[in-house]
Amino acid sequence: MVRLEVQMIEKAHKKGLLTTPYAFNENEASDMAKVGANIIVAHMGLTTFGSVDAQTAVSLDESVFRVQAIADCPISGPREVEFIPKKTKGVHGSYGASSMERLPVEQAISIK
């Protein structure tokens, strides 16, 4: 992680802004927590659905271990949103990026 990202989160937090940085591993999550990040998003890589359809993402089972270690796995819908919190401790939900904006739009366009 670029140190500038950590510094930006620290400055934003000190100004009273809500900070929600992505972390790809334990070290990044720890760095962000130390500077006051409000919500740390455990990011598992690209979404394995839709037009991007990444082929390199980790499985849901592997995501459980990674998310727990970090405390956005490859979530593309409600099934996955339910799966991770049930299998981990201290995880309270999902931060829906592509699964909340890009995928529903793609599905709606493909229906027409």
Image (cartoon, rainbow, N blue to C red):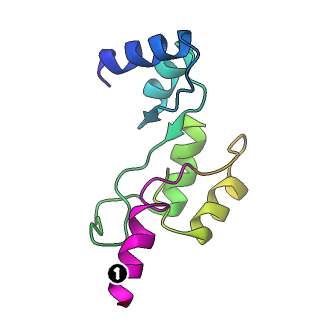
Asked if the stretch drawn in magenta spans residue 88, the answer is no
110 lies left or right of 104: left
Report the residue that reaches farthest toward the bottom: 112
Return the x and y of residue 29 as percentages of the image width and height.
50, 27
86 lies left or right of 2: right
The quadrant the C terminus occupies is bottom left
* Residue under the point 36% across and 59% down: 57
Quarter occupied by residue 28: top left
Q: Nearer the viewer, residue 104 or 90?
A: 104
The number of numbered badges drawn on the structure is: 1
Mark 1: secondary structure: helix
65 lies left or right of 21: right
21 lies left or right of 45: right
* Residue under the point 47% across and 62% down: 99
Vertical arrangement, residue 111 with respect to residue 1, above or below? below
Quarter occupied by residue 24: top left
The kind of residue tagged 1 is Ile
Quarter occupied by residue 37: top right
Q: Which residues are magenta?
A: 95-111
Vertical arrangement, residue 111 with respect to residue 78, above or below? below
* Residue under the point 39% across and 16% down: 8
The quadrant the N terminus occupies is top left
* Residue under the point 45% across and 11% down: 11
Residue assigned mark 1? 109
Report the residue that reaches farthest toward the front: 112
10 Å crowding of disc 1: few (<14), some (14-19), many (20+): few
Return the x and y of residue 77 as percentages of the image width and height.
54, 69
